[in-house]
Every structure is written in structure tokens, then in C-alpha cells.
Amino acid sequence: MRPLALLPLAFKQLVRHRLRTLLTVLGVAAGMFLLTAVETLQHSLAEATETTAADTTLVVYRENRFCPATSRLPEHYADEIRGIPGVREVVPVQVVVNNCGASLDVIAFRGVPDGLLLKYAPEISIIEGDLSLWEKRDDGALLGEQFARRRGLSAGDTFDAVGITVHVSGIIRSPFAQDNNVAYVKLPFLQQASKTGLGVVTQFNVRVNSSSDLKTVAAAIDSKFKADQQPTNTRPEKAFFAETASQLIELIGFTRWLGLGAVLAVIGLVANAILLVVRGRVKENAVLRTLGYPGRAILFLVISEGGMLGLLGGLLGTGLAWVFLRWQSFTIGSEGHLLAIRPEVVTALFAIATALLLGLLASVFPAFQAIRQPIVRSLRD
């Protein structure tokens, strides 16, 4: 007997008890919604903190400073950094945020010198408005796509935050989550609007020739300004985020326990539902075995029902989590750096596969319970 031929029968058995099946699927969906959210957090954090061979950017910050409001460096440092061997480009950046602590509602302005925006963020593309409008206006701002969506802004609007009023010249899109969640303005305008003064910046973004130059160039920069009044601390961009957002990383690390709880809840829910199914179908299973169905067929039938419950709940919960996270575009900020919580296809596939596997595993014990009962006793009961 072909096991796959029993799949339609397993599906019919689930449909016969619609309410029980619906409640089980909804319970599994709730667990997989939570698991998908947790895995999205973990995946987003890994992308933001794990250095790869393609990373060639250093962040030069004021030593022993974390919040952008306390990091102040002379803008003329840029000319001295450019003379260091291995340095390809230096961009002074002013960063202003509304909250330095861990928060879901972070507004971040990044001021870059006129003409250096595409060197600082070469991957951005204008999806609404015009770059020339931004270049013409001193108070022009280019908003990241997700930033604009959360605030309900479009090109031509006026936006005020952190005591800074800007004119939205355009909306940008980038493959990097950081760019999609900030507002780019001109450096002199932001220096004056934030009252930090001309000639003072928050940090320098330094691009080196290759990833092998990161440590050498970072050591050379810090050594050069070690004796100055404003010493520096230079780190790779992702390592800088990992160090400054330590509280955020600890918070996200705790969510792994929530994911484990969701997994255990799904196993218990499916196992309980299948046990009820097995106990309610004692005579039916005995009749099937009397008609010639072997024990392995009953085993496959019960396990496939659990797999279907897990798969249906996984598809529903993962789909809802995907839509919710894409729609809300959550961003967590800490010390002026942003972590965009953006679901990926690989995360969704992992969650669905996990739901299917959990459904199958949870059905193993009830399935063996079904085939261990003697046929005569089952028919008599």
C-alpha cells in the first residue's frame, strides 16, 4: 500500500472535526507567529553585527562616547585621515537623534557634506521626488522609504522633529536597512539647526581599499589623534554597532527563550490534539486494520494528520507575521544606531519547515499508541 495514498484520507479526518482542527491550527499559528518574529529579530541583528569579507567601512567616533550628542570631533580631522595609507574615502557625518536609549520610536537625522551623499550611501535610489531639489534647498531632506511610510510623509511635505524643521525633497530606497530609516540632510544645515556649531561632527565614515586594511587603518587613525584634545576610537561599522547597542543585543538575545517557549507550546498543542483524535477513533482504526491496513499505514495516517496541522498553522502564523512586520516596518534604535526588523524569505521558510517538523514529531507518540492497541479489544470497546 502506498503511504501517499493515505494523505487524502488524513485530510478528510481533519475536516470531519472542523472546530477541533480550527482551534489547533489557530494555536499553532499563534506559536509560529511568535517564532517568526523572534527569528526575524535574530536574523536582523546578525546582519547588522556580523562582519563579512565585503565590509570596508570604519566608523571614527570620539573615544569613550556612545550617544551622538556627546561625540564631538573637529571636521578638519577628515583631511588628516585622508592622508593615511589604505584610506579610499572619508565622509564627516553629523548625527542627531531624538532618543539615545533603546526605543522603538527613533528619529535620526544624518548630515553629510554637499556632494558627498552618494559617496556615503552609494546604493540609494530616489523613488519619489528629485535629488536636484535636495541640492538646491538648504533645509531639504531625503527620507528613507520606511521612515517616510511610518510618518506618512511624501515629497513636498514639511517635517519637524528634535527641534529641526525640514522640507521633504525626496524619498529614497536602499538595500541597507539603515538608509531606509533615516533622514539625510546637508551637514552645515544640521550643524546650525542642532546648535553644535560649524566645524564639529559626530563621526567620520572611512572607506578603505579592502577588508584586510580595516585593522591597520583603524590603528593608524587612533594613533594619529591619541594625543589630541579629542582622541578617537575607530572600529569596523558592524563592530561599532555591536558595541554601542549592547543593551539592545542583550534584549534581543532574551527573545530566544520566547522562541523556545513557542516551540514547546506547538509540540504540546499538536500532541494533545492528535491524542484526542486517536482516542476518539479506536474502533475506526481497528476496522481499518481488520480490512488489511498494516500497522505502518495507521502510523503514517496519524503522523500525517499531525504534519498537516503543523503545516497549516505554520503557513497561517508565518504569513500573518510576514504581513504584520512588513506593514509596520518596526525599527529599534540604541545610541543613535538603528536596527530594522525586516522579515526575509529564508526566515519564513525556516518557520514553516519548523512548524511541519514539530507537527510530525508531536504525532509520533500518539501514532504508536494507535497501533499498540489489540484489534479485538479495540472493536469490543
Image (cartoon, helix red, strand yellow):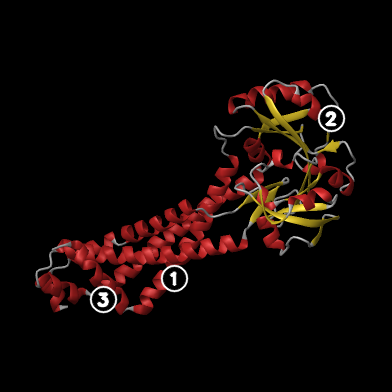
> Which residue is found at the position 32% from the left and 63% from the top?
307
Q: Is residue 181 above or below residue 28?
A: above
Q: Quadrant of the C terminus?
A: bottom left
Q: Type of residue at label 1?
A: Leu
Which residue has dot 3 on it?
280
- Which one is earlier in the sequence, the residue at label 3 or at label 2? 2
Q: Quadrant of the N terminus?
A: bottom left
- Which one is earlier in the sequence, the residue at label 2 or at label 1? 1
- Which one is earlier in the sequence, the residue at label 3 or at label 1? 1
Q: Type of residue at label 2?
A: His
Which residue has dot 1 on it?
26
Tell me residue 380's x, y (percent).
13, 78
Q: Type of residue at label 3?
A: Gly
Which residue has dot 2 on it?
76
Residue mark closest to the camera, 3 vs 1: 1
Tell me residue 161's x, y (percent).
81, 57
Tell me residue 318's x, y (percent).
47, 62
| Residue 101 relative to residue 76: left or right | left
| Residue 361 relative to residue 49: left or right | left
Q: Is residue 175 above or below residue 158?
A: above
Residue mark closest to the camera, 2 vs 1: 2
